[in-house]
Amino acid sequence: MIKNIIPIFILTLLLSINVSCNKQKPTTTTEKVAVKQFQTEIPIYDFNQLEPLLYTERDKIYIVNFWAMWCAPCVKELPYLQEFAAKNPAIELVLVSLDFTKDIETKLKPFLEKNKITSKVILLDDPDANTWIDKIDPNWSGAIPFTIIFNNKKRLFFERAFEDLKDLENEINKIRNH
């Protein structure tokens, strides 16, 4: 009797393993979608390294936005900047974070991912703000958000947050239509 039970037991075991393995979802190929990834490295610049990014010889439009995670108006306008950049790949957006370098891994990167910010981010770590703020715009008080929209023909400075996407588009059109 035991001799008959062992083959039945083994057969049952093999069948149950086979059935359970067949319940796996079939592997399917998924279409590759071009999704812009989050930055894995946030470069740290001093002002001398950042300054060349604030000027161009080209007709291409650039947006450079100075912001920080602790600045509520900055955080509020980031989705408008991100949406505009996604819809207008010919325009280059650079987000210059004024956050602390020690917070890059623990706070800044998680913040960017949570808020789906895929635009280029640079962290400006230059303690001599009184000097570099005046070099960017002598009329800038140092308050953020602060945005420069420019090409080789025109420069506009904004010491305020953009209210919505339309507000940002209206200001960029002043450069486009110049």
Image (cartoon, rainbow, N blue to C red):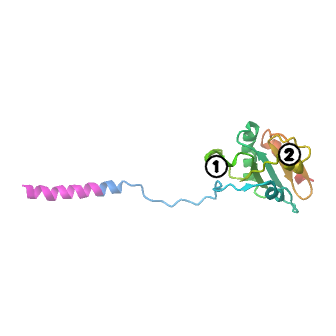
Q: Looking at numbered disc 2 in the image, what kind of residue is underneath it? A: Asn
Q: Magenta stretch?
A: 1-17
Does the magenta portion include 12?
yes
Residue at the location (92% across, 57% down)? 153
Residue that lies at the very extreme toward the top in this rendered image? 72
Q: Nearer the viewer, mark 2 or mark 1?
A: 2
Query: With 26 as the anchor, is 13 left or right in this view?
Result: left
Task: Classify the position of the N terminus by image quarter.
Answer: bottom left
Residue sitting nearer the eye, 93 or 22: 93
Q: Is residue 116 visible?
A: no
Residue at the location (65% across, 55% down)? 39
**Picture disc at residue 109:** 1
Q: Residues within 10 Å of mark 1 (few under 14, many from 20)?
A: some
Disc 2 target residue: 130
Residue that lies at the very extreme toward the left in this rendered image? 1
Residue at the location (69% across, 49% down)? 101
